[in-house]
Image (spheres, rainbow, N blue to C red):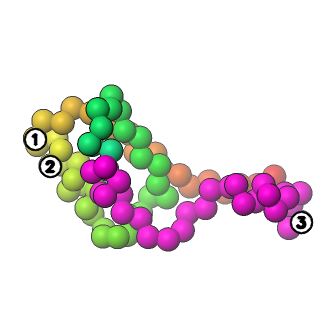
Amino acid sequence: NGEGLTTETELRLPKAEGGTSLAKSLMEALKGDHDAIYVLSDGYENTPSGRFSEVLKIARDIGVKTQFEFCLFYQLLTF
């Protein structure tokens, strides 16, 4: 690997890959009694695009007061 990382360490590092259904995860989280919901994402919802915003708007429209924080996870890891 040339950067001093072991294979074991490399396997534990998060990787942004595959399809993301943020809306489905948000709906699951809304089933619980949470003070806040934190979303960590690579910044692009791609299955299907835009549904997260729709679910969040509907939640607000029906009176859900849960705090939402969206955290963009994009970081180039260098060692």
For image coordinates 56% across by 55% down, the residue present is 74
Whole-percent x, y for residue 66 in the image:
27, 33
What element does badge 1 sit on?
loop
Q: Quadrant of residue 3?
A: bottom right
Alpha-carbon span between mark 1 and mark 2: 6 Å
Local packing at callout 3 (Cα closer than 10 Å; few below 14, some 14-19, many 20+) is: few
Quarter of the rendering occupied by the N terminus: bottom right
Residue picked out by circle 2: 58
Q: Earlier in the sequence, mark 1 or mark 3?
A: 3
Whole-percent x, y for residue 55 in the image:
21, 53
Residue picked out by circle 3: 2
Residues drawn in magenta: 1-28
Residue type of the residue flagged with mark 3: Gly
Q: Is label 2 or label 3 in front?
A: 2
What element does badge 3 sit on?
loop
Q: Is residue 15 above or below residue 29?
A: below
Q: Quadrant of residue 11?
A: bottom right
Residue type of the residue flagged with mark 2: Ile
From the viewer's perspective, tell me whether residue 73 is left or right of residue 53: right
Find out whether residue 5 is within the magenta segment.
Answer: yes
Whole-percent x, y for residue 40 in the image:
47, 49
For image coordinates 37% across by 38% down, the residue present is 37
Between residues 19 and 41, which one lies in front from this camera angle? 19
Whole-percent x, y for residue 51 in the image:
25, 61
Residue picked out by circle 1: 62
Alpha-carbon span between mark 1 and mark 3: 53 Å
**Residue 23 shows which numbered tag?**
none
What element does badge 2 sit on?
helix
